[in-house]
Amino acid sequence: MSRAKKTFSRYAASAAVLSLIEEVELTPKPGLVDKNNNGAHQDLTIDLMRKSAVSLKETFEGIAYISYGRSSSILLREEISAIGRQGEQRMLETTGGVNTHKGAIWAIGLLVSAAAMGKGCYSIEEMVSLAGETARYSDRHCPITATNGKRVSEKYGVSGARGEAQQGFPHIMNVALPTLEKSRAVGLPESSALLNALLALIIHLNDTCILHRGGPEALGFAKKQAAAALEAGNLSYIQTLDEEFTKRNISPGGSADLLAATIFLDKMQPNRMDNNMLKELQYTQ
């Protein structure tokens, strides 16, 4: 058990970090940091985002290790939250105080925990369901802070990152994953399939990052333009959209977090996980 637990925890953490890096390196993206530019962000660079992602490996490994083989409970919720808060602190130390991945720590941390509860054998449906169950527990030790996401959620009556998780990540299950699978099925390159998934998320998600920066007008503009880009299906349109989002200070950061979470879930399907790791898990369980 101990060896399998360590092996799986390392694997899940590596998959989580790689998912964050693959999301930021996906190029071009509208209003977001990528290989071409920093999008609508003055304080972010792709190198900073990479360093931030790598700094979270220990956090995700700790969440996986403590969750391995357990059931969802308020105690586990509080334990992984404490690890997540330590991860946030490490992230901020790495980035010089810039919030690069707070939303991703929440979303992917819950999914890492759910994957570990199932010892790597759960389906995507089981993982998101368990993650939602865990997210619905209250953390009695978490200090109440007025975050941008919380303020925006209350102001505009949208669910935000917390509600998305508590509902079992409906935008991943009903939007991002189906779009990704459909794009792959028609033979699109992986980068194009992921871009389509991102555009679909922007269309359907009431992204609190966009609302925080520009309110409902910016959100409506982003949704309309993302729909046109998805229909056009070419990179030049997305590059134009990137320029327009940047000019208008629009950054679909919530959609980017959900794309990274989608990539993670895709990697953690039992039939897609590394065969060598699966063999080691079977040998040591």
Image (cartoon, rainbow, N blue to C red):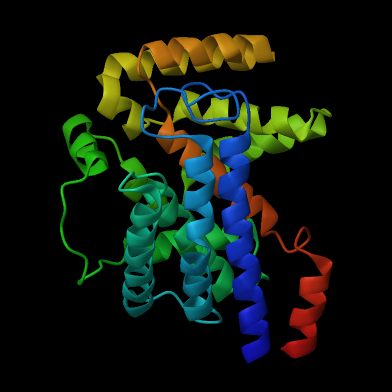
Residue 43 placement, left or right of 189: left
- Quarter holding residue 99: top left
Q: Nearer the viewer, residue 276 or 272?
A: 276
- Residue 197: x percent and y percent? 61, 32
Q: Nearer the viewer, residue 263 or 203?
A: 263
- Residue 88: x percent and y percent? 35, 58
- Quarter holding residue 268: bottom right
Q: Residue placed at 61% from the left, 82% from the top? A: 5
- Residue 241: x percent and y percent? 52, 12
Instruction: Name the quarter where the C terminus is drawn.
Output: bottom right
Q: Is residue 9 visible?
A: yes
- Residue 276: x percent and y percent? 82, 72
Q: Is residue 1 visible?
A: no
Q: How many marks?
A: 0
User: Does residue 181 sit above or below 283 in this rendering?
Assistant: above
Q: Nearer the viewer, residue 120 or 58?
A: 58
Q: Residue placed at 79% from the left, 27% from the top? A: 188
Residue 231 placement, left or right of 55: right
Q: Residue placed at 28% from the left, 19% from the top? A: 216
User: Does residue 179 sit above or below 121 in this rendering?
Assistant: above
Instruction: Name the quarter where the N terminus is drawn.
Output: bottom right
User: Does residue 93 sit above or below 148 in this rendering?
Assistant: below
Q: Residue placed at 23% from the left, 39% from the top? A: 148
Q: Nearer the viewer, residue 131 or 191?
A: 191
